[in-house]
Amino acid sequence: MIEIYDRKGFDVLVSWPSHSLRGADLRGMNLKDANLVQYDLAGADLRDANLEGADMRLADLSGANLLGANLTGADTEGANLTGTIMDRRVIPIKAV
């Protein structure tokens, strides 16, 4: 099981019943202020998810679908965004 905590590390935002978030269906999830540092979210479906203020530094978001996701204030520094779908277009960012 994977637990996603807030940035402070106190509150569990999501308990995921698998050992991986790779390709996970996280559509519409409330991940506001989530700590997703170095998480493997490759191919994950994050459409319409609330990722406001999420810390996604060094995360693998390659091929993830972020259409309609709220990324206001999210930190993606060093994240792999290769092939990530955002704002109705594919972001061609080099692989990390």
Image (cartoon, rainbow, N blue to C red):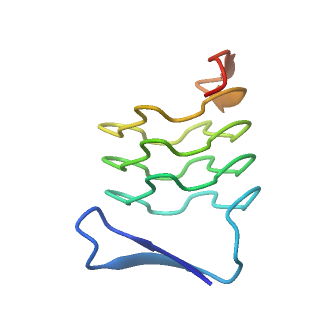
Which residue lies at the image location 77% right of the left edge and 56% below the top edge? 23
Residue 27 figure quarter: bottom right
- Residue 61 at x, y = what percent? 62, 41
Residue 13 figure quarter: bottom left
Residue 40 figure quarter: bottom right
Indicate whether 28 appears above or below 46. Answer: below
- Residue 74 at x, y = what percent? 36, 40
72 vs 70, left or right, is left
Quarter of the figure with the N terminus? bottom right
- Residue 30 at x, y = what percent? 45, 63
Q: Residue furthest front?
A: 96
Q: Give the number of callouts.
A: 0
Indicate whether 34 appears above or below 63. Answer: below
72 vs 96, left or right, is left
Q: Nearer the viewer, residue 46 or 39?
A: 39
Which residue lies at the image location 30% right of the left edge and 47% below the top edge? 53
- Residue 4 at x, y = what percent? 46, 71
Quarter of the figure with the C terminus? top right
68 vs 85, left or right, is left
Indicate whether 46 appears above or below 64. Answer: below
Which residue lies at the image location 70% right of the left edge and 76% below the top edge? 19
Which residue lies at the image location 43% right of the left edge and 35% below the top edge? 76
